Amino acid sequence: MNSPNFNIAAVERETGLSKDVLRVWERRYGFPSPERDSTGERQYSAEQVDRLCQIKRLMDRGHRPGKLIALPTEELAVLAPRHANVAGEPAANADADDLAALIELIRRHDATGFTQAMQQRVARQGLQRFVQDTIAPLSWQIGQAWESGRIEVFEEHLFTELSKRLLRQNIAALPAGRGHPRILLTTVPEEQHVLGLLMAEALFCLEGAECIPLGTQMPLMEIVRASEAHAADIVALSFSSAFPARQVAPLLQQLRALLPSEICLWAGGAGVQRTAAIPGVSLLLSLDDALQALHSRQQMGV
């Protein structure tokens, strides 16, 4: 098989590094070092793209690019695990053998079998236990399997898409929530991961809250406008472990300043695990924390 080459637009898309950054690094550090095609356009090898992806992951964790570019590939691999924990530690009562069987269906690319097995678990466990005892720990184990090289990126995406579809179907089957509080759920720009948001939405709906899902990557001003238009009591954001940790606190501080004081701001997901306390923001480190925050709000009658 011939090794594919990537033009600069494809590298930008694959790595999340802008074209300007790639050109600056080329001049300053001598890496990446693309070849040129017959029209003079830069062409990057797959190996260079992989290395750039590693560097970008480490930059998101606070490392400096100049030092990273100088490191041998082996040292980069040690510093940059392929995938970070997406859902915290697995639930203590999760049946590891049952979850392993579900992962094996994904590895065999048996989408129908996986969907049927998951639907059976929903029927057996009920939606709340399914979210907490199946989806959450299974997400964690899928991440670990990818880290160890036991599954591929496309297999992880298959798991995510099938799980999203199943959660949405079950949320849609719930009675329409007309209670309190009214919770607007979304993510900030560049946060594309929605599975954690769907898990929270399912649990909130089951507790009688009225959920307003806006999907992912909403500009901050649009979040503010939507919260006012829907008379939301709470804005709930999800941050995955893939989101740059250094950006979480500034974004939350900015959104808190933009939102009316009477609207609560909640932030959950693996991406807030190391975030320091922020005045006016509730950091929810687990699904149990999210439920507890909801129950506290409901008991206060607001």
Image: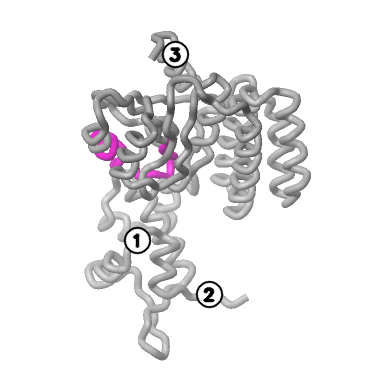
Q: Residue at x 37, y 54 (%)?
A: 56
In the picture of the structure, the residue carrying the numbered disc 2 is 4
The answer to whether any part of residue 79 appears in the image is: no
Which labelled disc corresponds to residue 17?
Answer: 1
Labels 3 & 2 near each other (Cβ < 8 A): no
Residue 253 found in image quarter: top left
Amino acid at pointer 1: Leu
The answer to whether any part of residue 178 appears in the image is: yes
Q: Front-most of 69 and 151?
A: 151
User: Is residue 149 found left or right of 301 in the rendered image?
Assistant: right
Q: Secondary structure at mark 2?
A: loop
Amino acid at pointer 2: Pro
Q: Front-most of 105 and 230?
A: 230
Q: Earlier in the sequence, mark 3 or mark 1?
A: 1
Q: Earlier in the sequence, mark 1 or mark 2?
A: 2
Q: Secondary structure at mark 1?
A: loop
Residue positioned most to the bottom: 38
Start-end of magenta stretch: 238-253
Q: Residue at x 21, y 33 (%)?
A: 257
Residue 78, compared with residue 3, is above or below; it is: above
In the picture of the structure, the residue carrying the numbered disc 3 is 298
Q: Secondary structure at mark 3?
A: helix
